[in-house]
Amino acid sequence: MRVPALILVAVTGLLGVSACATAGEPNPTYAEEMAQLNAACQARGGILTPIAGATGPRAANDYACEIRGGGSGRIN
């Protein structure tokens, strides 16, 4: 449970920093942000899962990337 929360905080932080860096571009729509989050999560082998009770204007606040299965394989 701790790992998805940390991933959510990291993704939210990165989206916040990138929003500041791209002040000239319009903010992504909820659907666009959802697609970006889903692609990033799937690239890490995870699946987006809704956060209970979360209903906000940003997908990053409503979903967490849940990674299931074994370890990364880096530790032997």
Image (cartoon, rainbow, N blue to C red):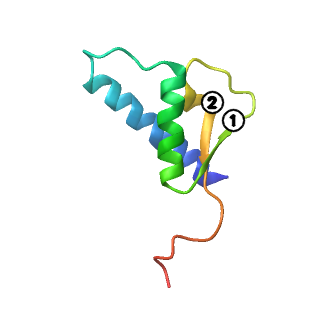
Q: Secondary structure at mark 2?
A: helix
Residue 15 appears left or right of 68: left
**Residue 7 pos. (x, y %):** 52, 47
**Label 1, on which residue?**
51
11 relative to 26, above or below = below
Residue 51 is drawn in which quadrant? top right
Residue 45 is drawn in which quadrant? bottom right
Whether the residues at callouts 1 and 2 have beta carbons within 8 Å, the answer is yes
Residue type indicated by callout 1: Ile
Query: Label 1, label 2: how many angstroms apart (C-alpha)?
Result: 6 Å
Looking at the image, the residue that sits furthest to the right is: 52
**Which badge, 1 or 2, is on the more N-terminal residue?**
1
Looking at the image, the residue that sits furthest to the bottom is: 76
Q: Secondary structure at mark 1?
A: loop
Q: Which mark is residue 36?
A: none
Packing grade of label 1 (10 A; few <14, some 14-19, many >=20) is: some
**Residue 69 pos. (x, y %):** 65, 66
**Residue 41 pos. (x, y %):** 52, 47
42 relative to 62, above or below = below
Residue at the (50%, 37%) spot, across then down: 37
Residue type indicated by callout 2: Asp
**Label 2, on which residue?**
62
Depth check: give the residue in front, 10 or 30: 30
43 relative to 72, above or below = above
Residue 26 is drawn in which quadrant? top left
Residue at the (51%, 70%) spot, across then down: 72
